[in-house]
Image (spheres, helix red, strand yellow):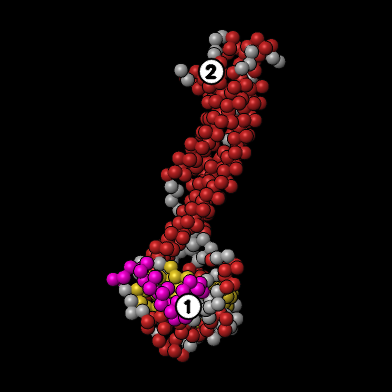
Amino acid sequence: MDVREPLSAAIRALKANKMRSALTTLGIIIGVAAVIVVVSLVQGLKTSVLKQVERAGSQTIFIRPVFPMDMPFAEYTKIKNKDMTLDEMRRLARSVPQITQVTPLFFNGTEVKAEGRSANVNLIMTDETYLELNSIALVGGRNFVPSDLRLGNKVAIIGPRVIEKLGLKGNPLGKIISTPTLSLEIIGVLEEQGAQLGNDPDQNILIPLTTGMAQLTEAQRRQLFFQARVDPRLSADDGAELVEESLRRIKGLRGTEPSGFKVFSPKQITGIISGITGTITAVAGGMVSIALLVGGIGIMNIMLVSVTERTREIGVRKAVGAKRHDIMLQFLIEAAFLCIMGGAIGVGLGFVLGAAIGKALLGTMGAVPLWALVSALAVPAAIGLIFGLYPAAKASKLDPIEALRYE
């Protein structure tokens, strides 16, 4: 079948109605761009979170209390001991020689003030092992020392965004910043790490755990998080199992009695993150694909209008020898061309928007996988063929005599 003549006729028809053709592709452009942006952001989020896990190292495991979201609420209420205390972590470190380091953590959002300005920050209560365990460097000042923890000194190590938000001029070391309950002397400045979706580590403020614990309620003091580094001769997965068994013994749990804590190895965290981002991609992709469906319906509508407007042209073409399949092919090509053109523009627009939004939220643009690019072009082409089929079939069935009489 020679497609050159139907292709040429289709292109001439589209050029004759440039504005209508452009508006017709708008739904496809928006749908494809939305898919590319969503996939880009989800992949960027995944990469960003995994980088944080990698910074902690392959031998680092994470321990936290259970949350209601971890299980059905009825099961959650049956757990008797949901505490995670500093004393339990000390006992764990003593009972498991394969643990080489334990770092306590408590996270809290708060407001800080300095020199007449204020900022909302992430307050992390921890000890002197936090920076080493998470491979974070200082660009100025010093880390906590044992006396800071022993005496509960009111000192802080701050991120570069905190300096920026508070408008601190010159060397920030030695300056005082205030929370609603504490006045803290700046003793160190963290290296820049870059923003992530929903989290900006450059807005972190670290204070000694003992300093922060005095400001917490009794319930909060029993809900600590921990990071533990295991001996490199032991895999992180084996270390996680060992820690879980030891903690159950320390808490006096027996048999199948549910644990009030969760232990994660980097491999488990990576699997969880991949599962979550995969689900987000599928759900968000399905939602934004509705725009592609709407775009396809719009194309079918415009092609039906086009068939009506060009009834006499179709009659002339049939009268001079055009076959039914020639007419059908011409209209299918028009519909597919509109969708492919919209898909190509949508891909370009999606990359631009994805880069801009990713830079603002994540500090980087996530790599768009090949399947997303192929789908962004193949799906619109398929939509063009599917939704262009009915108008094309209607045009090809027109009786040439009746078409020539059409006014």
* On screen, residue 218 above or below 397: below
Q: Which residues are magenta?
A: 232-260
Residue closest to the eye, 252 or 83: 252
Residue, disc 2: 325
Residue 363, image x and y in percent?
A: 47, 59
Q: Compared with residue 216, is residue 22 higher up or lower down, i.e. above or below? A: above
* Quarter of the figure with the C terminus: top right
Given residues 375 and 146, the one toward you in this image is: 375
Amino acid carrying label 2: it is His
- Above or below, comparing residue 309 to residue 57 in the picture: above
Would residue 311 appear left or right of 173 to someone viewing this image?
Answer: right
Pick out the residue farthest to the bottom. Answer: 151
- On the image, the x and y values in percent for residue 117 come to 59, 75
- In the image, residue 256 lies at what x, y percent? 48, 71
Q: Which mark is residue 253?
A: 1
Q: What residue is drawn where x is 46% and y is 74%? A: 255
